[in-house]
Image (cartoon, helix red, strand yellow):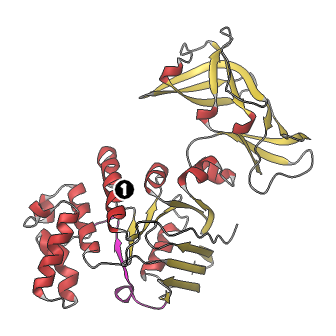
Amino acid sequence: MSIMDVTTEAPAHVTSASGSVELRSLTKRYGDAAAVDDISLTVQAGEFLSLLGPSGCGKTTTLRLIGGFEFPDDGSIQISGKNVENLPPHKRPVNTVFQAYALFPHMKVADNVAYGLRLSGVPKAEVADRVSRALDMVRMTAFASRKPAQLSGGQQQRIALARALVNRPAVLLLDEPMSALDRKLREEMQVELKLLQRELGTTFIFVTHDQEEALSMSDRVAVMKDGRIEQIGTASSVYDSPESSFVAGFIGRQNSFAGAISSFDSAGVRVQTAGLSLYSSRPTKGGVPASSGAEVTAAIRPESVVVSSSQSGAPGPASDGPVNSVTGTLLGVSELGHSLQLVVHTPSDDQILARLPRAANPPTELGSPVTCSWSADAVRIFTS
């Protein structure tokens, strides 16, 4: 889809400083290539929205257009109802935290945070008060006299946030600010950043290629591909109800099988692949082609697959409708903390990925015969 325009009720934590953002038919080209291709989007005041997608999808260019670091070839940008697409960055009510924190190495932490205020001619007493509040906000008051080289990566990130927030922007733009942190610290900072956003009520627009990061932090997620918004919605709606094969594959893992529709009935459709016959009671938004032989892709999340020993007669997934099942050989088992990831090889040379809680006690003996089953409701159908 070329244009997505989704609005929601404003979050309950909105403050007077929060700003809404509205993009209309926004386009940015570099030569013949459209980095951002005719997108429309409304971000409510006080919302935490993530732009999510692979490298080169246009998410950072979109952020730079909002921030004023790039200018659009077509379309408009409104912040709190005012057109800003022709204004330079310093005249827009936004601040940006970049992937590289860009702290001044020769300045102390407090001076880094105060830099923009002093440049704007804010009175000395007010500068001191606002810097103190900003450092307290990110729990860095004790480090005010240190220089950036004396700080860890996470601490430098907090200072970059304080420097951006001290100017009281209506909108804060964040361009993959946690990509350089190790996994444990990144997860800790995700929690802190979301709590800070809730406390302040400032509108956050966050760019990331990390699906878990976007899903865990955002009020809504906009999934981008080739300069366009493929889908936008809450984390649960994007994950549970993907509207395209790309979104289903990019947001989490999926088992994907190319095939063709072989039959319809009142409850759903049946897809025949090279080696599997799959029944779905849950086609995607927009439906599926109403003709047998239409080429489609069937997708099943690994956590929807139940694996049992072929000899055990263990029950499949709880379901009021039809259940899909296939036999195979257990090819691999991976430990994932509280869960296990199983790979099953089928006689048709397909591989099925399953993720089950350890408490489910699935079979783990490699080479053993197993049965994979999943409900018809777990099968998504996408047009090829």
Q: Is residue 138 magenta?
A: no
Using the image, determine if residue 332 lies above or below residue 124: above
Which residue type does callout 1 highlight? Ser
Q: Is residue 121 left or right of residue 336?
A: left
Whole-percent x and y of residue 236? 56, 50
Whole-percent x and y of residue 24? 60, 81
Identify residue for label 1: 179
Q: Which residues are magenta?
A: 86-101
Using the image, determine if residue 207 lies above or below residue 85: above
* Quarter of the rendering occupied by the N terminus: bottom right
- Name the residue located 40 percent from the left edge and 66 percent from the top edge: 13
- Name the residue located 58 percent from the left edge and 73 percent from the top edge: 41
Q: Label 1: how many residues lie within 10 Å, few (<14), some (14-19) or many (20+)?
A: some
Q: Residue furthest top?
A: 311
Using the image, determine if residue 351 lies above or below residue 115: above
Q: Residue furthest left?
A: 145
- Name the residue located 69 percent from the left edge and 54 percent from the top edge: 244
Q: Name the image quarter holding residue 262.
A: top right
Towards the viewer: 42 or 294: 42
Looking at the rendered structure, the secondary structure element under dot 1 is: loop
Q: Is residue 71 left or right of residue 371?
A: left
Towards the viewer: 66 or 267: 267
Whole-percent x and y of residue 280? 78, 39
Q: Is residue 95 magenta?
A: yes
Mark yes or no: residue 73 visible: no
- Name the residue located 36 percent from the left edge and 56 percent from the top edge: 179
